[in-house]
Image (cartoon, rainbow, N blue to C red):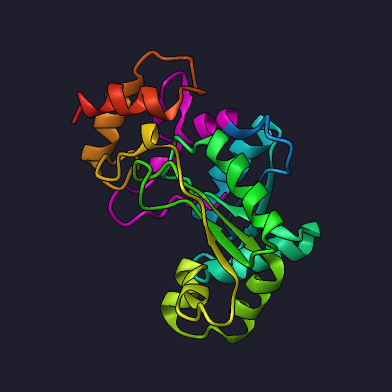
Amino acid sequence: MQVRMGSTRLPGKVLMPLGQTTLLGWIVQRIRDLPWTLVVATSDQSQDDPIADNCECMNVSCFRGSELDVLDRYYQCAVENGFSQIVRLTGDNPFPDKEVMRELISLHLAESADYSYCLGELPVGTGSEVISVEALETSWREGRATHHREHVNEYILEQPYRFQISKLEVNSAKYAPTLRLTIDTKEDYERIYRCVQNDTNVNIGTEALIERCSSSV
């Protein structure tokens, strides 16, 4: 999971309060029971020391790498941990859908895909992506444009003829592509904070979020 303190529009959001914890704590609690290794990948800049400290308090692995070359951060993290596949999550999305994530990983492995995703139908911020480390290494080695380094998956998406790309079709009950459940701005944060205020259920499902958060827009 990629996180950093230096958000342009909402600095420090990853450690802002959410529910009974922080945004980072909420995401970690939501996904840490999945049967895969969880690593928080942040930068090696001093401004991100609080993230590393927070990970230590939560007993979560933390990898530190380039702040702006996110592709390099992912690749070096994968190499250090000996991963063959990477599930990409970001620290501004508090509600990754674990059920969909499991389905996506199953699809990815069954189809021997290089890149798999479930974006565009779910509420914004609840989807996920899976990237093989082999495809990640190709992107890292060949993708030299700024947007390749910043967004991790764009070198792959620009060359679909080179990579096996799979898309998961999601349950129609979770279809809400115009609902924003991501935190980019102060307004996003305040709306989502209201959705989960005093809530201890970090595992709230996507269907319930659609009903609850749509009324908080």
Count of all numbered marks drawn on residues in the image: 0
- Is 16 located above or below residue 169 in the figure? above
From the viewer's side, name the closer residue of 199 and 99.
Answer: 99
The answer to whether 4 appears left or right of 78 in the picture is left
Looking at the rendering, which quadrant does residue 180 occupy?
Answer: top left
Which quadrant is the C terminus positioned in?
top left
> Which residue is rendered at x = 70% and y = 58% of the image?
85
For this view, does 200 lie left or right of residue 72? left
Rendered position, 73 above or below 117: below
Which of 147/40 is in front?
Answer: 147
**Res 45 seen here:** no
The residue lying toward the viewer, choosing from 122 and 45, is 122
**Can see residue 187?**
yes
Location of residue 155 in the rendering, given as x and y in whole percent from the top left corner: 50, 77
Q: Is residue 144 left or right of residue 196?
A: right
Q: Is residue 17 magenta?
A: yes
**Residue 58 in the image: x percent, y percent?**
65, 31
* Quadrant position of residue 78: bottom right
Q: Position of residue 27 (x, y in %)?
A: 52, 34
Residue 179, by quadrant, is top left
The magenta stretch spans residue 120? no
Q: Which residue is pictured at 69% across the width and 61% down the height?
A: 77
Residue 40 point in image, percent of width and height: 62, 47
Residue that sits furthest to the right in the current view: 82
The region drawn magenta spans 1-30
Q: Residue at x 68, y 34 (%)?
A: 34
